[in-house]
Image (cartoon, rainbow, N blue to C red):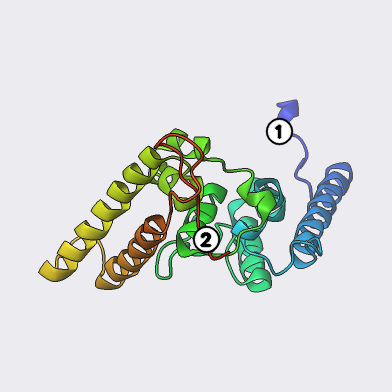
Amino acid sequence: MNLFQQGDFTPTANPRLSRLAEAAKKVIQEHEMRILGAIENPPAELDGKKAWQMTREAWLSLCAPVKDAYDLGINFGIIAGDAFLKRHGFTHNAHEFVVGSISNSRHEVQVAYAMLRGDNIPAEVLAQYPKEHWPESCDLRVFEHLPRYVVTKSEQVAALATWGARAARNRQCLGAKNFSYETEWDLTFYLKAYEQVYNELLMLTTEGRPQGDDLIWLARKN
C-alpha cells in the first residue's frame, strides 16, 4: 500500500491543519476590519478634503487602506473601494478633475486642473509643484504657462501664445460642431478656462519695472 495514500489530510480532517486554517482566517479577517476601520475613520485633518486640498503624501496615505485591501485580493479591494467612495464621496482614484471626466488618482493631475479652474489651493500643496515640475510631465507640460509661474516678459508672451492657441482650437471645434473626441460640454468648459487664463495673463503689467524690458510685475486681485 502506498503510505502517501493513507488517511485524509485535508484541513477539515486533520485537527492541526484545521486549527492553522482557522487561525489564518482570523488574522485575515482582523486585517480586513482594520482596513475598513481606517477608511471609515480617516485623520481628522484630511476628512472632507479633496485630493488637491492636501499634500501628495497626505493623499497617498488617505488612499493607502484601499491599496492594502487589493493586496489581500481583488474581491476585498472592490469592497474597500466601495467603502471609500461611500465615506468620502469620491473614489480612491480621486474625483473627476473636470465634471464629466474620468477620475484620476495622480495627485499632480488633481492639482493642475484645480489651478486651471482657479480653486483655492493650500500653499503647502502649491509648494510641491513649482514651475520646474511640469516640463517633466509629458501630458501636463502646458501648466508651466499658468499665470502664477509667469515672471518675465518672454514668459508672458509664451504663455499668451499657448493658451490663446488652445482657446482658438476649441472655438473652432465648437463653431464647426466637431465633437469627434470631445463633447460640446468639454470644449465649452475648456474654452472658458483657457479664456480666463488668457485674460489673467493680459492683466500682467510692466509698471514699476526697475530695469530692462524682460521683468514684469504681477497685478492680481488676490
Task: Look at mark 2 in the image and give the residue it sits on.
Answer: 220
Q: Earlier in the sequence, mark 1 or mark 2?
A: 1
Q: Within 10 Å of the Cα at label 1, are there few (<14), some (14-19), or many (20+) other Cα atoms?
A: few
Q: Residue 170, labelled with which disc?
A: none
- Of 65 and 193, which appears nearest the observer? 193
Q: Residue 5, labelled with which disc?
A: 1
* Residue found 69% across the figure and 50% down from its top: 124
Q: Amino acid at mark 2?
A: Arg
Q: Is residue 35 left or right of residue 192?
A: right
Write down the quadrant of residue 171 in the picture. bottom left
Q: Is residue 179 something that shows in the picture? A: no
- Distance, label 1 to label 2, CA atoms, is 83 Å
- Of 144 and 52, which appears nearest the observer? 144
Q: Within 10 Å of the Cα at label 2, are there few (<14), some (14-19), or many (20+) other Cα atoms?
A: few
- Of 163 and 40, which appears nearest the observer? 163
Assign a secondary structure to mark 1.
Answer: helix
- Of 85 and 58, which appears nearest the observer? 58
Judge whether 71 appears above or below 83 on screen. Answer: above
Q: Is residue 17 left or right of residue 50?
A: right
